[in-house]
Amino acid sequence: MMAMTDKKVLVTDDNAALRGLLRVSLQAFGFAKVIEATDGERALETLRAEPVDLLITDWKMQPMDGVELVRALRDRVSSPAPYLPIIILTAYADAGKANLARDAGADQFLVKPFTAEALARSITTVLDPQRSFVSDSNYFG
């Protein structure tokens, strides 16, 4: 895995235990700072106040879920971080959900439960400086 010592990550999940598990894993991967938010609205507030290098968000949260958060971030007009790499976590493993997350602008789709190795692979993929970003009238992500 690439060096993460200068990277900040925002973890958004309404489950404190999962946020803790992710925090410990991300610290073990060497991330400089792990910031936590309990839902999409709090994540947006955090991103307006402090830039981060990566967002890992759960799908199912209230009042703003992960897909709504992704869509808000990919809004080129109002987003505090439209190009932010995003990994969305979900317990839903079907292709329809993966396509919905992709179409919203998520860079990676990771099904729970996941391994540290799968998380590391997803992080390496989205933080690759060569990753493609598509921007046209119908899609941004």
Image (tube, grey):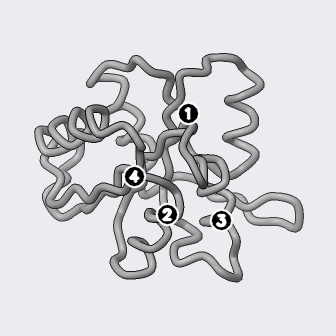
> Viewer-nearest of labels 4 and 1?
4
Q: Residue at 69% of width from left, 17% of height from top?
A: 94
Which percent across, then down, holds residue 114? 38, 20
Of the image marks 1 and 2, the number of the one nearer the N terminus: 2
Query: Could you give the CA–CA distance between mark 3 and mark 2, rounded to whole angstroms?
Result: 11 Å
- The answer for how far apart the CA atoms under marks 4 and 1 are is 19 Å
Residue ID for mark 3:
72
Residue 59 x/y as whole percent = 56, 39
Q: Position of residue 24 (x, y in %)?
A: 15, 38
Q: Label 2 amino acid?
A: Leu
Decide which of 56, 64 is in the foreground and name it. Answer: 64
Residues 115 and 129: in front is 115
Q: Which residue is mark 1?
A: 109
> Dot 3 lies on which element?
helix
Q: Residue at x 14, y 59 (%)?
A: 32
Label 1 and label 2: CA atoms lie apart by 15 Å
In front of the other: 37 or 71:
37
**Disc number placed over residue 32 in the picture, else none:** none
Q: Nearer the viewer, residue 134 or 88?
A: 88
Q: Earlier in the sequence, mark 3 or mark 2?
A: 3
Query: In the rendering, which numbered label is found on residue 84?
Result: 2
Q: Which residue is at the far front?
A: 63
Drawn side of residue 4 relative to residue 112, left or right: left
Q: Nearer the viewer, mark 4 or mark 3?
A: 4
Residue 28, by quadrant, is top left
Marks 4 and 2, how far apart in space? 19 Å
Tell me which label, 4 or 1, sits earlier in the chain.
Answer: 4
Dividing the image into 4 quarters, which one contains the C terminus?
bottom right
Residue matched to label 4: 38
